[in-house]
Amino acid sequence: MTQQEYESMELLRFTTAGSVDDGKSTLIGRLLYDSKSIFEDQYEQVKKTSERRGEEGVNLALLTDGLKSEREQGITIDVAYRYFSTPKRKFIIGDTPGHIQYTRNMVTGASTANVALILIDARNGVVEQTRRHAIIASLLQIPHIVVCVNKMDLVSYSEDVYETIKDEFSNWASKLDVKDVHFIPMSALVGDNVVDQSERMPWYKGTTLLYYLENVHIGSDHNLIDVRFPVQYVIRPYNDEFHDYRGYSGRIAGGVMKKGDKVTILPSGFTSTIAKINTYDGELAQAHAPMSVTVLLEDDIDISRGDMLVRENNQPEVSQDVEVMVCWFNEKQMQPKGKYTLMHTTREARCVIKEIQYKLDINTLHRNMEDKDIRMNDIARITLRTTKPLFSDPYRRNRITGSVILIDEGTNETVGAGMII
């Protein structure tokens, strides 16, 4: 494979979620090992560690548990990212922790995912953590969910056990805003239906996990209807060769942009026409989300970082009052009427917590109107008032223009991540 072919391969981001000891790290280790995506020395190190701990066989979970405290306890605490590729696709895996006190880590790991793998221990069935993770996947609008019914080897590969879990999850998930759910019975420990088809479950006629990940259609996961181009940087070379060059660079957050298209610049409202679309590899006739490009306009307009190029008759909401579902990240609880720095696409503003409407019970979806104490890992619906207008879409329509992060002005820590309603 040439470098060019590798770079042009589609990238799929997926995240794992499940209760403690459901086998998330083992599944990723098995995926990496069976798809020949780990180096020999990495495998040897894991093998030696497994032997030292007196474990039978090689514990593939150790490939992802990078923190010393994770390896000691045999659990995942932080989000561990792993990269691998097959001849069909490139992948980024976010191995997220299962404990309730790490809800914020799951939100972080899942916010950019195309696919969520929700693991269920076949012996335990659908548990509270399963529901919690499905709710978060639904809140984060992850387009595809794969329910991995794991540890089938411990229930004698029973079709009845699998079908019972499948029916229970399907009935419950029908209440959520989940578009595409796929079920796979597997054993990550011995490799059934992970990369290779299992001969021990002839009753299962579906695909393996790797085949699903290689072939699931993610091209339409990005919004290709509403043109949204937040300007990240203005390029002015200031040399004789590019004397009049003025390009606006950034990552397309939505839609398809073509040379000759008429665009409106927010917040000024001025209009112009796209003269060129440049990339590192040369000029393009058109570009689409999520490509990073430099756009040149026919008119010389004052545009700076944080401005946005949109279609004339397809514009985002422009407002200083926004309602968001926020997941609180910080040990210091949210301050009602508190002031924070807000980041939205490439735009930075200051904001105040205008109102805390309710706290969401992440297990039942119940709205608690009484409890307004928003602490670490809580999810709540709040109203923000910003110092500058934001150019936003609802999160369900565009995950980039529909998300914000809140930053503590004193410590510069990221204290919350929000989805615009």
Image: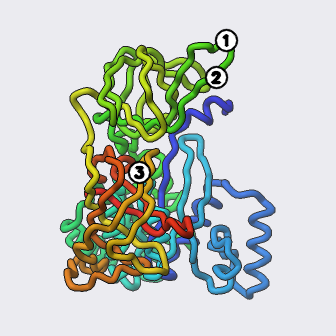
Looking at the image, how many numbered discs can be counted on the residues? Answer: 3
- Disc 3 is placed on an element classified as strand
Q: Earlier in the sequence, mark 1 or mark 3?
A: 1
Mark 3 or 2: the one toward you: 2
Q: Which mark is residue 237?
A: 2
* Circle 3 residue: 344
Q: Which mark is residue 331?
A: none
| Residue 215 locus on image (x, y percent) | 44, 45
Judge from the rendering whether residue 390 lies leftward or rightward of residue 70; answer left or right: left
When asked about the image quadrant of residue 136, the answer is bottom left
Decide: few, some or many residues near mark 3? Use Cα within 10 Å; few <14, some 14-19, many ≥20: many
Q: Whole-Å distance between the Cαs marked 1 and 2?
A: 9 Å
Looking at numbered disc 3 in the image, what kind of residue is underneath it? His
* Residue at the spot 31% in from the left edge and 77% down from the top edge: 362
* Residue at the spot 65% in from the left edge and 20% down from the top edge: 238
Q: Earlier in the sequence, mark 3 or mark 2?
A: 2
Q: Are marks 1 and 3 in contact (CB under 8 Å)?
A: no
Residue 177 visible in the current orientation: yes
* Residue at the spot 63% in from the left edge and 86% down from the top edge: 73
- Disc 1 is placed on an element classified as loop
* Circle 1 residue: 241
